Amino acid sequence: MSKHRPSAKPKKAGPVKSKTTRKPKIAPEPPDASTAEWMPRLFRNSYTRTGQRFEVEGWAIKIQHQGRRRTFSLCGDTKEESAIEARAIHETILAEGWEAALRSFPPRNSSENRHSKAEVAYWLQRLLRRRYRFPGSGEGESDLAVRIDHGGVGYYFPLGNKDSELAATKAHEIYRSVLRHGWEKTNRTFSRELIVGFEWCANPILWTYTTVHTLVDPPEPTKPEAASASKRILILETDDGIRRALAWCINQQKDCVAVCCDSVASFDIAMERHQPHLVLLNRSLSERVGYPSPGEFAQVRPGVPALTFSAAPDGDQMFVSTPGGAVGYLLRRVDPSNLLNPMLNLAGQIETTPEDALARVKSFFQKLLRPKAGQEDPGLARLTRRELEVLTLLSKGCVDKEIAQALGISAWTVHGHIKNIFERLHVRTRTEAVVRFLEK
């Protein structure tokens, strides 16, 4: 609690007066048990002047961890909202450290004039336009997105709106959901962007990958099975949003129809009912259904081949998740509506015997290794290692001061690197630079 010595002879303390006013925010929900435990620890700062005591509107919290103690002024209009923010600060400290917490929840009188994650203005500064769209979500070319990180976990969220104020408000709503309900419920409620990699071969690693948005609102996408020649593709995935997105992708493929299974327990029943020609299964579930070769194309049942896939929040994490020890790596982006193209034969039909399909897959990747004129980006090749680091952080939605802290350099140095990036890539805006980078 901070005090200010009276500037004149103290008078009898009058009623507490509010010193500041704030914009109204979204009405809070009742706190859950994990939030309620923070409420008794909240307090209001006050000071005295001319003998009167003034209480600062808004709550504060003192947090101590690893011998370090700091008081945070909270943004919530109510005690319940402030308790949610206090818990978020504590979780950020535990997962990401003090510096991450101070970046996300700076003091109110910070000379850097930054906003807290609990404010819509914070998200307004971090809106992005992502390079790759997912047609199944109905997203427009100008729609905005945002990356939200909490507790060591982060995702890109499409916001479904090109209006900055509305998009920032939705980003704030998603963040509040993460604080109050956790990632599991938030991911069931809001669509998020994922990179899905399809694991054709383990050594050398041959993967194709695409960008999808989880589909949280519609029922399972269906496609009439009128044509007897249609290939039935069974998708085994426990996450509803991922399963629906993959079903949409498969249903765009010529002569293919998606059928779905949402649990390992019902897998055998689904196999018997649908008699699929091919199975797509999440790598994390492969051992539980007896798949003998996680990470490569093989049979999951006699005569029924299967392909495992992995989902990651972004391309960097997908690459890190690839297993080590392989003699080589080749990853290729494909369009969401052409997931199974590596299996197509010369007649445009899908090969479903493991031997023929793998031969088609290897042929598909061999063609990619043939150099084509005009594919290289000389601008990106001229970037220095530090400039690539800056550009990578820009692509994740970081602002200059966050880049400076992450790389241990000054904000002015970041400005200089960004200027050099513009000159080397012949672009005029950060968005153009990030799009060039993501197209590499």
Image: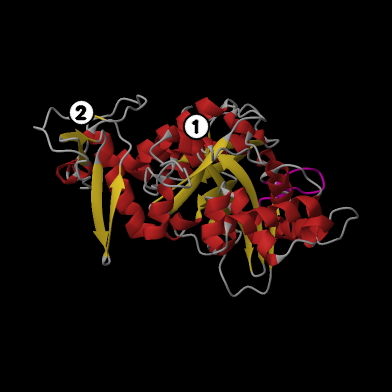
Q: Amino acid at mark 1?
A: Ala
Considering every residue shown, the one lying at the far front of the view is 9
| Residue at x 69% of width, y 35% of height | 255
Res 28 quadrant in image = top left
* Span of residues in magenta: 340-352
Would you say residue 101 is visible in this rendering?
A: yes
Dot 2: what SS? strand
Q: Is residue 111 above or below residue 32?
A: below
Q: Earlier in the sequence, mark 2 or mark 1?
A: 2
Of 22 and 366, nearer the camera is 22
Label number found at residue 133: none
Q: Which residue is mark 1?
A: 168
Q: Is residue 213 above or below residue 360?
A: above
| Residue at x 57% of width, y 46% of height | 397
Name the magenta segment's main secondary structure.
loop
Of 422 and 248, nearer the camera is 422
Based on the picture, tell me whether residue 416 belongs to the magenta stretch: no
Res 69 quadrant in image = bottom left
The percent coordinates of residue 205 (x first, y second) are 65, 65
